[in-house]
Image (cartoon, rainbow, N blue to C red):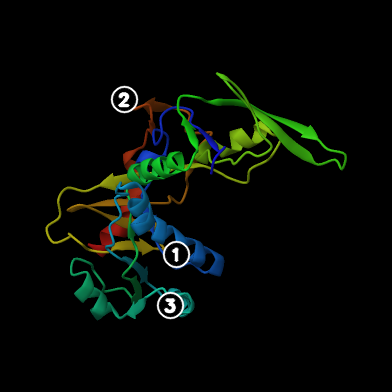
Amino acid sequence: MSGAVLLERERLTSGTTWHTAGLLWQLRPSDVEVELLAHTRRVVSRELEEETGLHTGWIQNGGLFIASNRQRLDEYKRLMSLGKVYGVESHVLSPAETKTLYPLMNVDDLYGTLYVPHDGTMDPAGTCTTLARAASARGAQVIENCPVTGIRVWTDDFGVRRVAGVETQHGSIQTPCVVNCAGVWASAVGRMAGVKVPLVAMHHAYVVTERIEGIQNMPNVRDHDASVYLRLQGDALSVGGYEANPIFWEEAVKYRPRAAGGLCLKTSTEKVCAVWSDDLRRA
């Protein structure tokens, strides 16, 4: 990793990282994603801590996909079969078995669930800090408060555009390779090099509940039909999801910076209720 440089516009984790859900679901329809997630889980749950001595905040509390119709349950059965091929333990549970696993859940309208016991949650800030520590130990440089202002490109003899360097407020770096990891700002960084990044950022709302007795160690829950999730957060729940009529980044121009330099977009009671309406059926 010697020679790699990470340029951070402010401070690490001060952008959108600090309020990322940090959920890790191992089963996806794509075999490539399943392999990638298996690798990620190994790194986050074991390898990073062994290498750096720092904890990523990994909690193996399991994951639960809920099926409120027959088609969704059939899909989860296929995911379970895919998981067997890649060594990911999973179980399709009946509503009664789901109630035993998660006593606080209303299962009256469920057809079943897919339970993956080795899914879990990581602390986004802790994981980022640990990754940065590991990278630095291998020779990488992490430079904070150094926003990128431009990317120099040139066209070779075959008409292919190639990177020549990166411009910052503090000088330039000569490099033939740039990895765009800017997240919500990725499209803006791509435009600096004349590249269109097919990414659309949206404003989402999430709610953290008060303490819930009996919620400790319960699995995270995902309802794909309602586009909502329930994330274990100590003895409370963090509830979020995708609204039916999302606000796109360009529209969400009013934000208030946090003391740490991050951002938190304004939301409304209506947006929160739109997310909560489907979750309340599970209570």
Give how far apart the Cα atoms at labels 2 and 1 are.
36 Å
Residue at the image position 73 percent from the left and 32 percent from the top: 153
Q: Quadrant of residue 280?
A: bottom left
- Between marks 2 and 1 in the image, the one whose residue lies nearer the viewer: 1
How crowded is the residue under tag 2: few (<14 C-alpha within 10 Å), some, or many (20+)? few
Which quadrant of the figure contains the C terminus? bottom left
Compare marks 2 and 3 and give the one earlier in the sequence: 3
Disc 3 designates what residue? Answer: 80
Q: Nearer the viewer, residue 23 or 212?
A: 23
Residue at the image position 66 percent from the left and 31 percent from the top: 192
Disc 2 designates what residue? Answer: 259
Q: Residue furthest right?
A: 157
Give how far apart the Cα atoms at labels 1 and 3 are.
15 Å
Q: Nearer the viewer, residue 19 or 229?
A: 19
Q: Residue 77 appears at what percent x and percent y?
A: 44, 79
Compare marks 1 and 3 and give the one earlier in the sequence: 1
Disc 1 designates what residue? Answer: 38
How crowded is the residue under tag 3: few (<14 C-alpha within 10 Å), some, or many (20+)? many
Give how far apart the Cα atoms at labels 2 and 3 are.
44 Å
Q: Residue furthest left?
A: 213
Q: Secondary structure at mark 3?
A: helix
For badge 1, the amino acid type reads: Ala
| Residue 141 against residue 235 in the figure, above or below | above
| Residue 240 against residue 32 in the figure, above or below | above
Whether residue 204 is visible here, answered yes or no, is no
- Between marks 1 and 3 in the image, the one whose residue lies nearer the viewer: 1
For badge 3, the amino acid type reads: Met
Residue at the image position 34 percent from the left and 38 percent from the top: 268
Q: Residue furthest top?
A: 170
